Amino acid sequence: MQHILESIIIALQALWANKLRSSLTVLCVVISIMSIIAVVSIVDGMDSYVKEKIANQGSNVFTVQRLNFFEIATDFDKFLQSLKNPNITLEDLEHLKSEVTAGEFFDASVSRSLPMNNGKHEVESIDIRGRTETYPAIGEFELASGRHLSRLDVQQRRNVCVLGWDVAQSLFPQQDPLQQTVKIANKHYTVIGICEKKPSILGSNQNQFAFIPVSTFFKHFGSRRQSVDIQIRTVDMERFTLAQEQARLAMRIRHKLKPGDKDDFYVSTSEQLVSFWEAIASVIFGTLVGIVSITLVVGGIIIMNVMLVAVTERTREVGIRKALGAKRYQITSQFLVESVILTTIGGIIGIILGFTAANLVAIFSPLPYRIAIWSVVAALFITFIVGVFFGVYPARKAARLDPVEALRAQ
């Protein structure tokens, strides 16, 4: 133990005597570790955030939609093939209501970005969402005031709307929005409800929307041939798989598909969304860490060269120590400890700067971050291994110096 402490003291003194060289050597390790910590923190934070938001939407909810956006985003041939898929219609919704006995709530959704105003104030690019009266049972849309859409609103195609929090505040900053009139693409609507303020998701404002009856949406902004997404919620997870199978079978029969034909629709679940995100996150993480690892190897090579220079400069010192009885392992440990201290100092500084960088990114951008303890341990372990690996050769070279020849060195 005493020998190790002496090696550490000697190493620190040697590093302090060559401050500029030591600082430049440590810089490569600092940059590498800082990058790894920042990347891991941001990716891990995004991973937790996305999974939490998907879980909040309900694990017992699935969606029947026209396209598999995950496939067409990565396969151009499947994209071209998917263009032939028939639209999902409100008639399909009614058919699924009668056939999917394991489902509890059924909802159709269709959206379009349109401007909205009340004569005095205007908000551009509002997400106008046509929904049925069951949408509150599918997603998280708590009311701050007023009421949700009703069945009569949908059946009678009423011109009513439920506003997102930010839309209501922008259009009616000084008055109660309820029962006020707004214009959506020159169509008059009465405000019947205001949704509570929701947090942003990765910088996306979740309060810039307006719900209107899906029947009214088709009357004013589309046609009944426009494709909708049908969301189905089950009572519990025990009926979830059965409901999916019933929905798939009902849609295949309705679309007159033969046993060997592929589905011309897609059933999406929160589990598939999580898997898709995990695949993206793993690619991002692997690519960035791979690039950063190259920097770390370059830093290790620089450390090895610096240690070789140090051995050359301190040849006479090594000769004196050997003449006084120092063993080979003592000389080896001295330079090895010096190499490890260099990388460890760089690692510690890199960890601190990495978390600082991740925090700054979270402050000035929508990307969240999370401190992962395992990344700290991994960073320290990596710096130790780099120090040992790239310090062994210079240390062994120093230990093999002939004491007589070393004493003659100037």
Image (cartoon, helix red, strand yellow):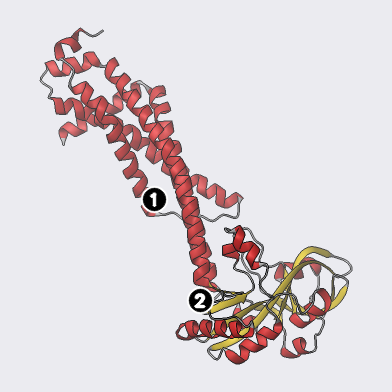
If the image is split into quadrants, where does the C terminus sit? top left
Quarter of the image where the N terminus is located:
top left
Instruction: Determine whether 164 is above or below 331 in the image.
Output: below
Q: Check disc 1 and report its element: helix, strand or loop.
A: helix
Q: Is residue 94 left or right of residue 381?
A: right
Q: Residues within 10 Å of mark 2 (few under 14, many from 20)?
A: some
Where on the picture, by quarter, is residue 152?
bottom right
Residue 59, placed above or below residue 15: below
Counting from the top left corner in percent of width and height, residue 131 is at 70, 79
Give percent across and percent down for residue 147: 71, 84
Answer with mark 1 or mark 2, whichever residue precedes in sequence: 2
Q: Which residue is mark 2?
A: 59
Q: Nearer the viewer, residue 221 or 353?
A: 221
Examine the rendering and report whether any part of residue 124 can be seen: yes
Closer to us: 128 or 283: 283
Residue at the image position 56 percent from the left and 76 percent from the top: 261
Instruction: State the residue at coordinates (14%, 18%).
Output: 322
- Residue placed under numbered mark 1 in the picture: 375
Question: Do we see residue 133 in this rendering?
Answer: no
Secondary structure category for the residue under label 2: loop
